[in-house]
Structures are given as C-alpha cells and as structure tokens.
Amino acid sequence: MFCLQIKGGNSYGKCSIKDELTPLLDKLKGADAVILGSPIYLGNSTGEMRSFMERYVFPFLVYSTDLPSLYPKNIPVGFIYTMGIKEENFDMFGLKKTIELNETIAKRIFGYSESMYSTDTYQFEDYSKYVADRFDPVEKANRRKEVFPQDCEKAFKMGARFVKRQKAAKIQN
C-alpha cells in the first residue's frame, strides 16, 4: 500500500484504500484524542498495529519543513503496550527505540504523544499447559494481582491527561 500525497489529488490527506476500515479512519479525524494498544511480540507491536498505523498516519505525512502534517488538528495520541519481558530487558530487544519511534511519528503528525507499558505480564491461566518453564507461575500471578492494577491506573491517568489537555486547548482557542 502506498498513498501518494499529490496536491489536490483524491487521496490528499486521506487513505486511498476504500474498505471496511475507511469509516473508522474518517471517524478518527473528529476524535479529540486516540489511544492505541498492542502487545509486544518479537520486540515490536503486532503486525495489525503496524498496519493500522500505516493506514492512519501515512495519509497525513508530507515532506515539507513548513507543513509538518496534513492532519486537521492537534490531538494527543497515546500508546499502551503489554509484554511478557521485564523492563530491565528493554535494551536487549530495542524496545525503547521502538516506543520512541512510534511517539516521534505520532508527535509529528498529531502534535503530541506519550506511551505507557505493562511489563512481565501474566500470559496464561494455566502455565502447566505450555512450554514455559522460564516463568514462575506464582510470581506471575502475584505480579498480575499487585502490579497490573497499577498499570491500569496509569492507563486511566493517561486518558485523563488527554481530556485535560484537550479542554485546555479548546479554552485557548
């Protein structure tokens, strides 16, 4: 898929592909904020997330120093990631770079971005059914009980910050 941004062309500022995703992409132009979530598999967000990002972001990309984006307004875009690895292993998988890259792209197109992540997540109801002897099921269950609610609170607070940010922006305009 490739969307050329020909001035005045039919796809200028919108995805040229017309399918069942088109109504959602059109609806997103009216959003005051967007929060996207993905598990991290193999050191990156899922292929579905990457494909969605390409469809959502690329139509607004221009190669201009004067006009950074064709997006009609500034909105905050958040990313929430879940992953089985521990935060201390981020560098081994290059995850900080992946997260920073998504934020940088979102900031350029939409104006603002931030991320949060939940690490060392609980993956299976019954670890004995899987080849997963690297994990301690009791430790994973305890982490889910103790840390995951804190991560959910962080995600909630991200949304609350976005609401405050947009209310302040509307007052200024």
Image: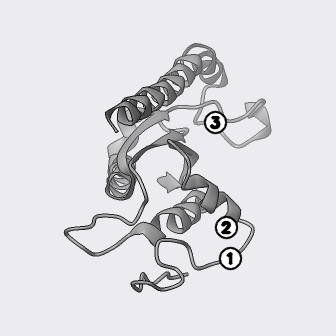
Q: How many marks on residues?
A: 3
Front residue of 163/88: it is 163
Return the x and y of residue 3 as percentages of the image width and height.
49, 81
- Quick one: label 1 or label 3, which is nearer the N terminus? 1
| Residue at left offset 55%, top offset 46% | 31
Residue 23 in the figure: left or right of residue 6: right
Q: Nearer the viewer, mark 2 or mark 3?
A: 2
Q: Give the residue type at disc 2.
A: Thr
Of helix, strand and loop, which one carries label 1? loop
Quadrant in the picture for residue 130:
top right
From mark 2 to mark 3, how far is it between C-alphas? 44 Å
Of helix, strand and loop, which one carries label 2? helix
| Residue at left offset 61%, top offset 26% | 136
The local crowd at label 2, few if under 14, some if 14 to 19, many if 20 or more residues have their Cα within 10 Å, is some
From mark 1 to mark 3, how far is it between C-alphas? 46 Å
Q: Nearer the viewer, mark 1 or mark 3?
A: 1
| Residue at left offset 54%, top offset 83% | 10
Residue 133: which disc? Answer: 3
| Residue at left offset 55%, top offset 38% | 84
Q: Give the residue type at disc 1.
A: Lys
Return the x and y of residue 87 as percentages of the image width and height.
40, 34
Identify residue for label 1.
18
Q: Give the residue type at disc 3.
A: Asp
The answer to whether marks 1 and 2 mark residues whose Cβ atoms lie closer than 8 Å is yes
Front residue of 61/7: it is 7
Return the x and y of residue 64 as percentages of the image width and height.
24, 73
Residue 137 in the figure: left or right of residue 164: right
Return the x and y of residue 116 as percentages of the image width and height.
44, 34
Identify residue for label 2.
22
Image height check: is 16 above or below 98? Answer: below
